[in-house]
Amino acid sequence: MKQVVQPASGGPVQVLDVPCPAIGPAEVLVRTAASVISAGTERAITELARSNLIAKARARPDLVRQVVRKARTEGVGATARTVRSRLATDVPLGYSAAGVVVEAGQAVTSIRPGQLVATGGAGKACHAEFQAVPALLCTPVPDGVTAPDAAFGTVASIPLHGLRLASVGPGAKVVVIGLGLIGQLAARLALASGCDVAGIDPAARPREVAAGAGVLALDELGDDTTERVIAWSRGRGADAVLVCAATKSAAVVARTPALARDRANIVVVGDVGLDFDRAPFYHRELSLLFARSYGPGRYEPAYEDWGVDYPAGQVRWTEGRNCEAVLDLQRSGKLKTADLVTHEFSIEQAGAAYELLASQPGGCLAIRLNYPRKDRQDQPVLIRRRPPADGRARCDSNQVGVGLIGAGAFATGTLLPALRAAGFARFVSVATSSGLSARRAAERHGFEQAASGASAVIDDPDVGVVVIATPHDAHTRLTVEALRARRHVWCEKPAALAEDGLDEIEKAWREAGGSLTLGFNRRWSEPLRVVREALDGVAGPRLVVYRIAAGPVPPEHWYSDRRQGGRLVGEACHFVDTAQALVEAEIEEVTGLSGSGDTAAATARFTDGSMAVIGYGSAALASGKEWIEVTAGGRRLVIDDFRSVRADGRNIWRGRQDKGHRAHAAAFRSAVLGRAVLPTEAMLATMRATLRIAERAAGHE
């Protein structure tokens, strides 16, 4: 399928052939019929992407702070690789469209295949022939509303939410500053609500369009315009002012007190500067409000990702119900949008549409993209010519084929280089949920094709090794599926989020007879090898004290998604496995305690009487993330962040940080080729112990 993207590193907008997206349980697959380019919002996205690094940093200081924190905890080198990886990604464009439902996820009950729906992007692509849309952002279109008109549903929800924040009703005087697409829609929605509307814009063409819809359209002439607004509002001033302009200047907001009555509402809908004098707002006791996109639910994972709606009695107008209201207004004829379309292009010509937007920003209101009807296609996107399958591909030591499911920063920046260094030479197929990232991963990391969905990778006869690096909640299902397909499997941690899932994995592994490894790379690191060698022959139980300063994660981080098992399960398994590898005995009992935030502590007792104490916290320490002390038989060994090892106070190893990724990949390849045996049972036992630690910690919250 075709999809419109903006490379994050800059350059022109591109139309790419990518695999069809895979939908989750709470998503809907939609074949797009029409989508709307919002001139202001999407021009800002493309301009930021095309700017230099300094301009990007000024625009997103929050990301700069994240980079600094990462550099402190993980080092400059790892951080630089991550930044380069992010700059090599693409920004999917579009957020307002309409199309026909092709498939609905198993948790979706309100949408059925064949329905015409309006769709909201919520950070995913809308300018694409097929979209994976959160179910609550997929609104059935009523009879009488066409797909081209319904494509305005989400973009019109933005000013509708702003109008609701303004708390105005029939007879209210509303001023709209900025008559671009959002401003035009704001004015029409206010008129449909029974308000009187005045619109202000310095450009003649937007004023003409607004006047044609019944708006008092005014040029921005300073005091003269203010006097006309005051006279129009019978000397009182506007009941509400909606700022829909897009400018870095604060002058737009600074002039709103002169237009507004005492105690009016000022609602900022557009992206404007905010460095202005407080006094005029204070003297009139104005309420300054900011509209957050389409309405309640936006940026909330529970609503958008999990499909958990808010009760109408508690939150009447969510982002989905705002879109519903827009469509109802279109059906009744109270909201017309067709005349707002200044240009139309086919999806294949989307690049020209964005060039027009960049060269003539004042001449565009809405640009509509049209899509020829196309059946769903799940065929892979070929990146390079594939060698013919001859039945030996999965056995030939030089041609063992690797398939990757999930292509995030860790998979592409750490796993793939380690696998390549280990000797894996043929990278066959890669799949991700979006399709776009699959294509880019295939191009940049030497895969022969980008596939549509995980099953396409697992079922490929040229794939002998399946690497699973998806979000955590998919690990169990995909590992079992790959093992049953007689593939060798590398599953990133955690392998399972519950013990019954772990049982299922173990059963499938024993029945399949292939190689299975979990992402516990530290047991293969050079510092652990040095410590085990130093303790070889030392009698008596061992005591392992393990401190982890993991660093904070922002509230919106995917660790907050309860479907992914949480940070303790997702990370602590690493440290439990490292302790087990240091003790070299089976775990027989565990405990777990949780503190405030991400703080937790665990203990493990081993069959030989050894003990491990693991303390996990979210502080970031300049001294490093991980510190391990092992004492046994009068000896004391310390691993300092996998950069050095001291034995009884004396340095016995120092080097670049080595957490064992490459040695782990080499051991896995040896096992795949039948030259070695992996400690799979020990790794599964580690995972089981971690799940029990998490269960006990949850019981003490």
Image: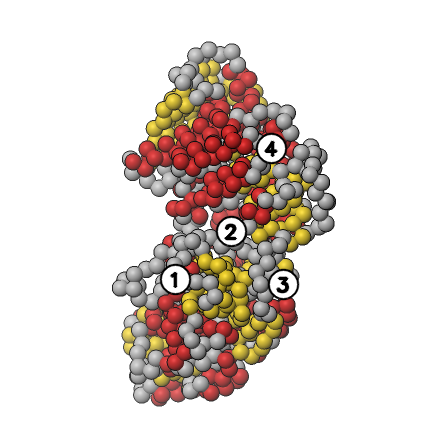
Which circle marks residue 665 in the picture? Answer: 4
> What residue is disc 2 on?
64
What's the CA distance linking mark 4 and mark 1? 45 Å
Disc 1 crowd rating (10 Å Cα; few below 14, some 14-19, many 20+) is few
Labels 1, 3: front one: 1
Q: Earlier in the sequence, mark 4 or mark 2?
A: 2
Labels 4, 2: front one: 4
Residue type indicated by callout 3: Val
Q: Secondary structure at mark 2?
A: helix
User: In terms of depth relative to the viewer, which is nearer, 248 or 616?
Assistant: 616
User: In terms of depth relative to the viewer, which is nearer, 246 or 285?
Assistant: 246
Q: Earlier in the sequence, mark 3 or mark 2?
A: 3
Q: In the rendered view, would you say 411 is above or below 90?
A: above
What's the CA distance linking mark 4 and mark 2? 33 Å
Q: Secondary structure at mark 1?
A: loop
Q: Are marks 1 and 3 in contact (CB under 8 Å)?
A: no
Q: Is residue 503 left or right of residue 59?
A: left
User: In terms of depth relative to the viewer, which is nearer, 303 or 475?
Assistant: 475
